[in-house]
Image (tube, grey):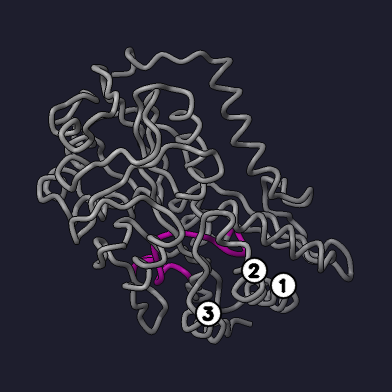
């Protein structure tokens, strides 16, 4: 498979640079640290907070932390989008002040955190299926049978009769389909594979769902930015990313068949319709693998910040609480333009009430 996937190193690096520039534009100079500061008290009036985890909320979190720092220059917040799996591990290992993930911690993982854990929903969005086909703009239709069959490696050509029948008149090439998937432990992968398991018994039995799965076909690429860049550069590719990446880079997105049999593209309205079907539990966790509703986009998820119930430094705890409270209220206004959906007021109220750490 890899032998068929030839890329110009120079042109690929240019694309990667484009993605990096978009992410960097959301960052402040203070967010470039790659390691947790040994002394979080920069001076008597300054506090540094370090977080790591999900790439899904990258654009929103970096915007939040930049905006908050501009209003509160004594609070420096560094966030490293390294993937949900790595973020969870760093949180459990107590090498960060907060983590981030699209899946919530299991009972076994919670038991490993001696300081206690609060999982705070902060934003929500959808997983877009993106592709690169010359002459085929957004809106390629894929059914609930075709989507898993492509990622299972059963449908291997773009002009396969099943795809062509759904998309009459589209210039589908007689060329191989190259699947691109996440190489790192990913909440985006967990949401996508959970949906595939919900709509395909074969996928559920052969592959299943999770932060990491054994993919039947394809090329592995690290994080949402990497997949976006790879697909933007290479013709004939298909993969999955958080919708914000597709929106920021103007990537072609698939119209997926939802549970009601309607073909829906990811956007603000279709994602909001689907998210309304998720009812969070008392501990603010929850998901829907295959949402109801004629206008609902079928692959959605919340994203959570992972914070400790107890911090050794009360000033750090106070600062982090204020940052999160700001993100849950004022920070929500940045979500739509970046490709996310603001939290419902009920969720904001419950999340704010949950911020009881000290």
Q: Residues within 10 Å of mark 2 (few under 14, many from 20)?
A: many
Q: Which residue is mark 3?
A: 348
Q: Check the image and report above or below for 230 versus 44.
A: above
Q: Which residue is mark 1?
A: 316
Q: Is residue 301 left or right of residue 294?
A: right
Provide the residue designation for mark 2.
331
In this rendering, does residue 117 appear at all?
Answer: no
Residue 230 seen by the camera? yes
Pinpoint residue 318: horizontal percent, then vertical percent: 71, 78
* Magenta highlight on residue 49: no
Query: In whole angstroms, how far apart are the C-alphas of marks 2 and 3?
Result: 11 Å
Chain part drawn in magenta: 95-113
User: Given contact means CB atoms under 8 Å apart, are the residues at marks 1 and 2 in contact?
Assistant: no
Left or right, 242 with respect to 291, comes to right
Tell me where residue 333 appears, x and y as whole percent. Answer: 62, 67
Viewer-side label of 1, 2: 2
Q: Nearer the viewer, mark 3 or mark 1?
A: 3
Q: Quadrant of residue 165?
A: top left
Percent x, y of residue 9: 54, 15
């Amino acid at each position: 498979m890899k032998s068929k996937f030839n890329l110009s190193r120079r042109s690929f690096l240019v694309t990667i640079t484009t993605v990096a520039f978009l992410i960097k534009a959301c960052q402040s100079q203070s967010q470039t640290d790659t390691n947790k500061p040994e002394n979080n008290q920069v001076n008597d009036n300054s506090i540094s907070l370090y977080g790591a985890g999900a790439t899904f909320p990258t654009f929103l979190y970096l915007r939040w932390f930049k905006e908050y720092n501009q209003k509160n220059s004594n609070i420096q917040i560094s966030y490293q989008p390294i993937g949900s799996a790595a973020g969870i591990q760093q949180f459990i290992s107590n090498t960060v002040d907060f983590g981030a993930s699209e899946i919530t911690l299991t009972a076994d993982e919670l038991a490993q955190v001696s300081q206690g854990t609060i999982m705070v929903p902060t934003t929500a969005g959808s997983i877009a299926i993106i592709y690169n086909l010359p002459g085929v703009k957004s809106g390629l239709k894929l059914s609930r049978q075709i989507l898993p069959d492509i990622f299972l490696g059963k449908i291997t050509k773009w002009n396969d009769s099943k795809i062509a029948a759904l998309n009459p008149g589209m210039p589908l090439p007689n060329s191989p389909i190259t699947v691109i998937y996440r190489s790192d432990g990913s909440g985006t992968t967990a949401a996508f594979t959970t949906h595939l398991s919900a709509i395909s018994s074969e996928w559920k039995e052969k592959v299943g769902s999770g932060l990491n799965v054994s993919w039947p076909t394809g090329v592995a690429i690290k994080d949402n930015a990497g997949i976006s860049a790879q697909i933007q550069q290479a013709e004939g590719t298909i993969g999955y990313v958080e919708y914000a990446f597709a929106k920021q880079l103007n990537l072609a997105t698939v119209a997926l068949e939802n549970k009601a049999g309607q073909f829906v593209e990811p956007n603000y309205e279709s994602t909001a319709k689907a998210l309304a079907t998720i009812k969070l539990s008392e501990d603010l966790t929850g998901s829907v693998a295959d949402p109801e509703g004629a206008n609902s986009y079928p692959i959605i998820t919340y994203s959570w910040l992972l914070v400790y119930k107890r911090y050794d430094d009360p000033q750090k705890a106070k600062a982090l609480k204020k940052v999160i409270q700001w993100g849950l209220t004022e920070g929500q206004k940045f979500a739509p333009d970046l490709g996310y959906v603001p939290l419902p007021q009920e969720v904001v109220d419950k999340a704010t009430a949950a911020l009881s750490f000290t």
